[in-house]
Amino acid sequence: MIFITAKFRVLPEHAEAWPELSRTFTEATRAEPGCLWFDWSRSLADSTEYVLVEAFRDGDAGGEHVGSQHFKKAQMELPRYLAETPRIVSQSVDQDDWSELGEMKVPPRG
């Protein structure tokens, strides 16, 4: 899979609204057949920073995402709300879902 993490620093006056501003793009991306997940989180250290963790089935699915109409629309609309160009880490990894973090194994409850 293609595993991507991107940091979006939003202009302070738009930080609270970012989930709504990016909602159409988020929902359209999640509906793509090759999208495994597309999840936003907000930084605890910087309230203007959102972190996007996304994964696509393979390079073809990632290419379809970047070529989609909703991606092109987001490229045109979303930068006006950003303080800087987003930063990204993108890697191909040999798995297709999350693995357990064995070092923090939760024992059975009950």
Image: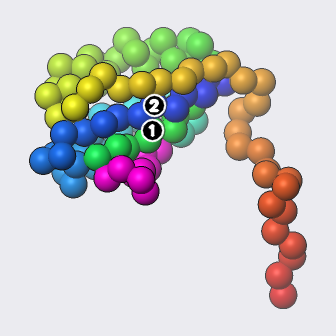
In the rendered image, is residue 14 in sight?
A: yes
Question: In the rendered image of this protein, does residue 7 appear above or below residue 107?
Answer: above
For disc 2, the neighbor class at 10 Å (few under 14, some 14 to 19, many from 20) is some
The residue to which callout 1 is attached is 52
* Left or right of residue 37, residue 78 in this image: left
| Quadrant of residue 83 within the rendered picture | top left
Residue at 42%, 25% (x, y): give it. 87
Q: Which residues are magenta?
A: 38-47
| Quadrant of residue 69 within the rendered picture | top left
Measured Cα–Cα span from mark 2 to mark 1 = 5 Å
Find out whether residue 45 is within the magenta segment.
Answer: yes
Q: Earlier in the sequence, mark 2 or mark 1?
A: 2
In the rendered image, is residue 34 in sight?
A: no
Type of amino acid at the residue the image marks with label 2: Ala
Q: Which mark is residue 6?
A: 2
Q: Position of residue 60 (x, y in %)?
A: 56, 12
Type of amino acid at the residue the image marks with label 1: Leu
Find out whether residue 85 is within the magenta segment.
Answer: no
Please report contact status of discs 2 and 1: CB closer than 8 Å, yes or no.
yes
